[in-house]
Image (spheres, helix red, strand yellow):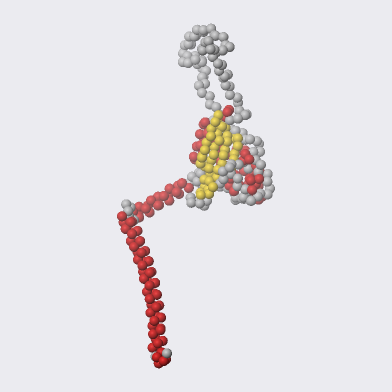
Amino acid sequence: MLWIKRNLFLTIGGVVALGLLGVGIYFLLAAKARGSALQEEINQSKATLDGFRGAPVYPSATNIAIAKAETEKLKGVLTDMKRFFTPVKAENVTGLAFRSWRDNTLADMRNQAKQARTTLPNTQYAFSFEAQKNKVDFLEGTFPAIPQQLAEVKAFSQILFEAHVDPLINIRRARVSLDDNASPVATDYLAQKIETNAVSGMVTSPYEFTFHCLSSELAAVLEGLIKSPHGLVVKALHIEPAEAAGPGGPNINLPPPPQPPDRNNPNRIRGVPPAAPVAPKPAAPGAAFPGAKPAGTGGSVVLLKERRLKVTMLVHVIKATK
């Protein structure tokens, strides 16, 4: 202790030097560890660069220019495709303004059906908007979804009217509002929902249309869908004869069921006496087939009579979110 007292400044200097030496060792080790980490990052970057250099497509100036040109070409294709997915324009209306627009739109669609001679299910048919047809106050989810759906149904219905389908049996759509959820008219709605693809930025709205038509009228409907700029895409198509679709259509005359043959005579039907042989009549001059009228009579022969079809069509309306 006496030595420390005599050499106090030397002792303090030694302690300070020892502390500084510890701090220096700490920073040295920390710097060494950081240097090792940076060296590891450098090695990884070198390995990545070597991988690029050894890859079949190297990011050279030429390849980068080609990639930029392809990107611009892709942007042009996307711009052209947007012409076929233009959203159907719907009025941005609510409350009293929507009620007026709704009534005018439904009346206009009924008038178009009358002019096209397309029979509707009833004179006050609401085109799947029975829940909103007579309402004054509307529940959550009505705006802007219902005006948009009404505009899309009108766009497709105009294609059906222009093709002169007859009759229009039913239209179904996705539920979008609390009024739809509470509606007792189940025939107005599909089980499918409106879907939004966040990656592509597209919204898909499903609709189902059921109608009777001839094959030429169905072709006109499909042609109208192809020419439409509103992204009307047919996802499913079910076709059956209108006579077999259910009650209300004309009856089909079917032949009587065949009778079992006689065991003693397989060529004879049980309970039916054998018919006397009939000599074939000579064909009339100029007759090409049985039942044809002689030439020069001025009559026409019906070779094929087309029957009406019942068509159920599932259509997706695809539009951009922006």
Say which residue appears at 51% left-offset and 41% top-offset: 233
Number of marks: 0
Front one among 57 and 89: 57
Q: Nearer the viewer, residue 25 or 295?
A: 25
Query: Image height check: is 18 above or below 212?
Result: below
Q: What residue is drawn where x is 56% and y is 46%?
A: 194
Q: Residue furthest front?
A: 1
Percent from the top left, x then y, of residue 301? 51, 19
Identify which residue is drawn at 38% across, 51% down.
70
Q: Nearer the viewer, residue 146 or 247?
A: 247
Can residue 19 be spotted in the picture?
yes
Where does residue 8 sit, x and y in percent of width and height?
Answer: 41, 90
Residue 19, percent from left and from top:
41, 81
Position of residue 206 measured from the top left corner of the image (x, y, whole percent): 55, 43
In the rendered image, the vertical position of residue 272 relative to residue 219, given as above or below: above
Which of 110/6 is in front? 6
Q: Is residue 280 left or right of residue 10?
A: right
User: Could you tell me which quadrant the N terminus lies in?
Assistant: bottom left
Question: For the point 60% across and 24% down, which residue is it?
Answer: 251
Give the answer, above or below, for where 187 lies relative to 305: below
Residue 296 in view of the camera: no
